[in-house]
Amino acid sequence: MAVYYHEGYTRNSRGLMLFTCSWLPESPIKALIFLCHGYGMECSNFMRECGVRLSAAGYAVFGMDYEGHGRSRGPRCYIKKFENVVDDCENYFKSICEKDEYREKRRFLYGESMGGAVTLLLHKRDPTYWHGAVLVAPMCKISEKMKPPPVVVNLLTRMEELIPKWKIVPTRDVIDSAFKDPVKREEIRHNKLIYQDKPRLKTALEVLRTSMNLEDTLHEVTLPFIVLHGGADKVVDPEVSRALYERAGSSDKTMKLYPGMWHGLTSGEPDQNVEIVFDDIVGWLDKRATGAIVSSTHERQSSRQESFLSWRGHSAM
């Protein structure tokens, strides 16, 4: 199926130009999908395969690089306030949904890693607006193994207003830890739009606070969702997705755990594994993409009662 790709820019409320892109199918559109990329990532290159695959399955897919990410303006990978990222996504995504040609289409969010946190915050702002979410290794809780000691957090907090943009937060090479396939890993490493330096102080603290706040409110998640996680993920512990699945108030929730797979399920695994993951994503979406948009109350009453934990028995290849 032919897929039509478009690029553009939109100006956010703070006057910065943000890069946008879309993948549109040749066939009639099933539903709308809005991409929320991970920390340091971008949409046009890194999430291209995701956009093409979902569009080829009949979905209109829209992405936007956050402020300071990818081809958007602003200090590189500097997040002054996490709510700014959510504001920008909400404003742009809803501007698409309100177009005449899309107004009657169902609306789905898609978040990878930190983008999972953005997705959940978008849902929490307007709980009945979105019809579902795909969450790939979402950053919605800090694993106990990764949580920094309170004394370290207190020390960094005292410094954040003095040196907010300093790249002083030590971190391991995430690319080496996230993407299993060596060829794909090197392609990602050579993507100059991806931020690969140390995290800035303010950014690191904003991400930490956001994750901890989400952890305390997972029970408020009520939209249908599928959460997918690699069993050998060293970047975001699989227990994070398990906590979301177990605590979320959603009546329609699904979890897929892939033994042996790493953090980059859709971009860093061998091709056969990527096929497995996208088959699960498209299969889940196809069951929920059709039907007229009706009142929120009716949607809740008629929503599927599918609530199960699926331990995918595929071994990583």
Image: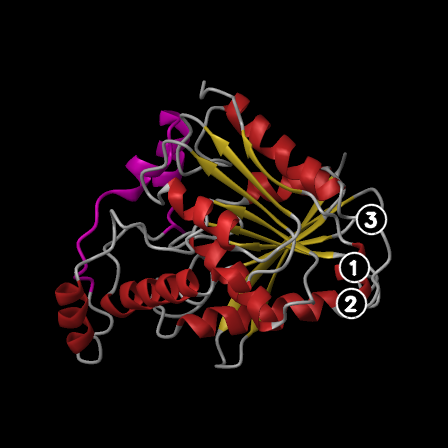
Of circles 3 and 2, the one toward us is 2
* Image mark for residue 301: 1
Q: Looking at the image, is mark 3 or mark 2 earlier in the sequence? A: 3
Is residue 188 left or right of 122 when viewed as pictured?
left
**On the image, numbered disc 3 is attached to which residue?**
290
* Image label count: 3
Residues drawn in magenta: 167-194
Is 80 part of what is drawn in magenta? no
Instruction: Identify the residue at image location x=77%, y=48%.
Output: 289
Q: Is residue 212 visible?
A: yes
Is residue 45 left or right of 79 when viewed as pictured?
right
Q: Quadrant of residue 256?
A: top right
Inspect the image, locate mark 1, and give the three-letter code of the amino acid beneath it. Answer: Gln
Q: Looking at the image, is mark 3 or mark 1 earlier in the sequence? A: 3
Do labels 3 and 1 touch, CB within 8 Å? no
Q: Is 104 situated above or below 242?
A: below
Please name the colour scheme applied to the rendered image: secondary structure
Q: Callout 2: few (<14), some (14-19), or many (20+) C-alpha neighbours within 10 Å?
A: few
| Front position in the image: 122 or 264 | 122
Is residue 312 left or right of 316 when viewed as pictured?
right
Instruction: Give percent across and percent down for residue 15.
Output: 50, 80
Q: Callout 3: few (<14), some (14-19), or many (20+) C-alpha neighbours within 10 Å?
A: few
Q: Is residue 76 visible?
A: no
**On the image, numbered disc 2 is attached to which residue?**
297
Inspect the image, locate mark 3, and give the three-letter code of the amino acid beneath it. Answer: Thr
| Front position in the image: 196 or 170 | 170
